[in-house]
Image (spheres, rainbow, N blue to C red):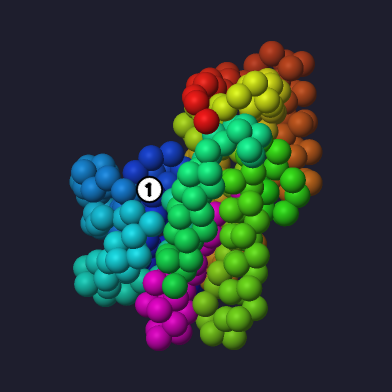
Amino acid sequence: MAADGLTGQVAVVTGCTRGFGRVLVTMLADHGARVVVSGPWLSESEELAGELRGRGAAAVAAPGDVTDPAQVAGLADVAIERFGRLDVWVNNAALATPVGRSFDLDPSWFERSLQVNVLGTLHGSRVAAAAMLPRGGGVIVNLLGRGDDARPTPHTSPYGASKAWVRSFTRSLQREYRDSGLVVMGFNPGMMLTDMLLEPQVVGDAGAAAMKPYGVVTRIFGDPPDVAAAALVRALSRPSPPSSLRLLGTGGMARHVARAAGRAVSRSGPDVPAPSPRRIEA
């Protein structure tokens, strides 16, 4: 990427009409990037693109259901047709599956996780690389999450397994394209206070029991999505973006614990909303 940061760069963010994606694409636009707004609901994409244009940004909306390879390919086409290039692609679209034991979940949840989290990342990476490699490179960002270190993720096994795949896939691309100019970044944003975290679906008594500690966990480790978005924007603004960025590594966790302790002593700091689980049938 250019040494002057994001100004004039062209970015596609999948699934960016809500949550972290919305914050990120807005921040990219505010930093001078030209953006393609996408999500499975075109009306939401068009509304957000209009808001960004109202702020003076260059933004266009396009259909972006990541389970449809044709729509994913169309995002790159729109970027190139409208802005003449593609510099940054963020595979942000993700599906959070219900909290519950693996065999309490309907197999359809595993299929949905595969379609969105795994194949959606594959489709986006293929399309982005095809557009970037002839120009000498670009940056693909793959969103990681709980489970990407291949450790057990009890009660969220479909999501955890999908993120383990994304990390392995990301590392394979890094090795395969290391001399091409293509940067493939694995980005773990930590615990973000979005609907995905705060309004989980729960299946069965085991799933409900697993949610009990989450009020404390989110108070300690949760951050507004702006924190992760700002960190990623800073990384993408560098002349040489990193191949890995993890906000809740050992150091990050220690800082969050210290922050929580300080808030407890001073009885100050913003209120952190507690998760509101919703019980559903398997």
The three-letter amino acid code for the residue at tag 1 is Cys
Classify mark 1: helix, strand or loop: loop
Residue extent of the magenta highlight: 127-145
**Percent of width and height locating residue 244:** 64, 62
Q: Position of residue 118 (x, y in %)?
A: 52, 58
The answer to whether one can see residue 256 in this image is yes
Q: Is 135 covered by the magenta stretch?
A: yes
- Identified at 77% across, 16% down, the residue is 265
* Residue linked to disc 1: 16
Q: What residue lies at 57% left-to-right and 36% top-to-bottom?
A: 105
Position of residue 280 relative to residue 190, above or below, is above
Expressed as whole percent of the image width and height from the top left, the position of residue 274 reads 58, 20
Res 8 seen here: no
- Establish if 95 lies above or below 72: above
The answer to whether residue 118 is magenta is: no
Front-most of 168 and 234?
Answer: 168
- In the picture shown, does residue 125 fall above or below 33? below
